[in-house]
Image (cartoon, helix red, strand yellow):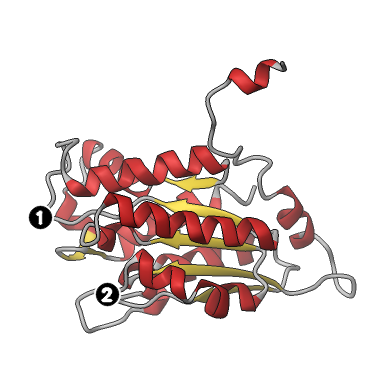
């Protein structure tokens, strides 16, 4: 038996996981083609700030698009948002083939854990696995996101549902060897570095532009 079978599963390597995608992003006209990145999830990637106000251009999908356009100036990149405010992963999984895979994405990001507290860990896990397996079958690379904060959550309590959902997302990224953006950890790092949580939030459960930028910068690390 190869030794690799004895190793614990790991998250994909940020330096190599999207190597085929970034290679395409470096192809010049007339040999290049459009590259679609789909951002699937709930109100946060949809751009809700202070509900019902939507601030698309300060939300992380658009901020990621700006970073990638600067990094790969010859690439035609679409960052397409299929997120719906208020949705959980079960609802997102039901429309995944029709709304996400139909766009023939090179990469899909999935961000549902904030709302999955309503349905619980077991139901959420089944829905995330459904989306992961559909993506794998279609040959689409996936980056999973842990939740952004909720100011009502106890971020230092491992038993808080937000932390439990985050840990489940981390485990799924390891199990399926896909990308992971640990949004919750990025916020905790910023807090420990001196940024009060409220300074990163537009309302109790939606980040402001500074909070979204934390997520966008972490996502961008997967496109070296």
Q: How dense is the environment of label 2, judged by Cα within 10 Å: few (below 14), some, or many (20 and up)?
A: some
Question: Residue 131, image x and y in percent?
Answer: 51, 61
Residue holding disc 1? 152
Say above or below: 93 vs 102: above
Relative placement, left or right, of 196 versus 26 is left
- The answer to whether any part of residue 217 appears in the image is no
Relative placement, left or right, of 138 versus 133 is right
Say above or below: 130 vs 157: below
Question: Residue 71, image x and y in percent?
Answer: 64, 58
**Based on the displayed image, in which of its 4 quarters is residue 36 positioned?**
bottom right
**Based on the displayed image, in which of its 4 quarters is residue 94 positioned?**
bottom left
Q: How dense is the environment of label 1, judged by Cα within 10 Å: few (below 14), some, or many (20 and up)?
A: few
Please report the residue visible at 57 percent of the width from the left and 21 percent of the height from the top: 7
Please report the residue visible at 22 percent of the width from the left and 84 percent of the height from the top: 52
Question: Residue 103, image x and y in percent?
Answer: 63, 77
Relative placement, left or right, of 20 versus 121 is right
Question: Residue 149, image x and y in percent?
Answer: 23, 54
Residue holding disc 2? 86
Image mark for residue 212: none
- Taking depth in this image into account, of 139 and 59 the one nearest to the observer is 139
Compare marks 2 and 1 and give the one earlier in the sequence. 2
- Taking depth in this image into account, of 109 and 5 the one nearest to the observer is 5
User: Which marked residue is nearer to the observer: mark 2 or mark 1?
Assistant: 2
- The answer to whether any part of residue 102 appears in the image is yes
């Amino acid at each position: 038996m190869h030794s690799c079978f004895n190793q614990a599963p790991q998250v994909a390597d940020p330096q190599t996981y999207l190597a085929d995608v970034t290679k395409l992003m470096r192809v010049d006209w007339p040999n290049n083609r459009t590259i679609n990145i789909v951002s699937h999830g709930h109100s946060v990637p949809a751009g809700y700030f202070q509900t019902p106000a939507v601030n698309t251009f300060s939300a992380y999908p658009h901020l990621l698009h700006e970073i990638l356009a600067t990094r790969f100036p010859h690439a035609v990149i679409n960052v397409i948002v299929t997120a719906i405010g208020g949705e959980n992963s079960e609802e997102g999984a039901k429309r995944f083939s029709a709304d996400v895979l139909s766009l023939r994405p090179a990469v899909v990001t999935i961000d549902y854990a904030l709302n999955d507290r309503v349905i619980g860990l077991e139901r959420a896990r089944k829905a995330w696995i459904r989306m992961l397996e559909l993506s794998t079958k279609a040959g689409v690379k996936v980056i999973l996101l842990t939740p952004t904060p909720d100011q009502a959550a106890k971020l230092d309590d491992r038993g808080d549902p937000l932390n439990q959902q985050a840990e489940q997302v981390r485990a799924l990224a390891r199990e399926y060897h896909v990308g992971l953006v640990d949004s919750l950890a990025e916020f905790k790092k910023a807090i420990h570095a001196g940024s009060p949580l409220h300074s990163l939030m537009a309302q109790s459960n939606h980040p402001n532009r500074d909070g979204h930028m934390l997520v966008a910068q972490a996502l961008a690390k997967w496109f070296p």
